[in-house]
Amino acid sequence: MRMKLLLDQNLSHKLLLFLEELYPGSSHVRLVKLSTASDEEVWTYAKKNNFTLVTQDSDFYDRSLLLGFPPKVIWIQSGNTSTLNINKLLLDSVEAIKEFESNKEIGCLELY
């Protein structure tokens, strides 16, 4: 199964345009009507629907430490940067993301 990404509210939905080919079926919390949902609701949705959460928010990292996975979390720690830079980071990290996807031991991937 290929990894599907669920982009958190703090990331632009426009990233989906660049990522669809690599991660078909990916979505954004806004598109699944979770833009004002709690972290718990987003977490539950991602888990039920086999998404990997992509966020700049440490709350999902903390939640993964407490609850384990799924869902897995990709935590982008690039600070306040443009959508283009985040897209580049995700595209440049394809190999690391593939390894993360297949690793049964790791629930969070930190990207810088």
Image (spheres, rainbow, N blue to C red):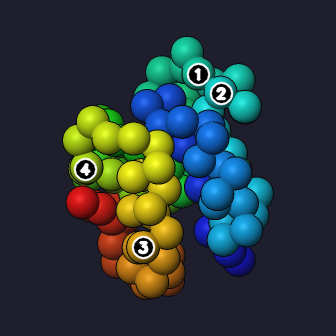
Q: Earlier in the sequence, mark 3 or mark 1?
A: 1
- Is residue 112 in view? yes
CA separation in Å, label 3 and label 1: 27 Å
C-alpha gap between disc 2 and disc 4: 21 Å
> Marks 3 and 4, how far apart in space?
15 Å
Residue furthest to the top: 36
The residue under label 4 is which amino acid type? Gln
Q: The residue tagged with tag 2: helix, strand or loop?
A: loop
Of circles 1 and 4, the one toward us is: 4
Identify the mark at residue 92; answer none if there is no mark: 3
Q: Within 10 Å of the Cα at label 2, are there few (<14), some (14-19), or many (20+) other Cα atoms?
A: some
**Distance between mark 1 and mark 4 Cα atoms:** 21 Å
Q: Residue 55, which numbered label?
A: none
**Mark 3 packing: few (<14 Cα in 10 Å), some, or many (20+)?**
few
Q: Residue at x 46, y 43 (%)?
A: 83
Dot in front, 3 or 4: 3
Instruction: Assess whether mark 4 and mark 2 are in contact (beta carbons under 8 angstroms).
Output: no
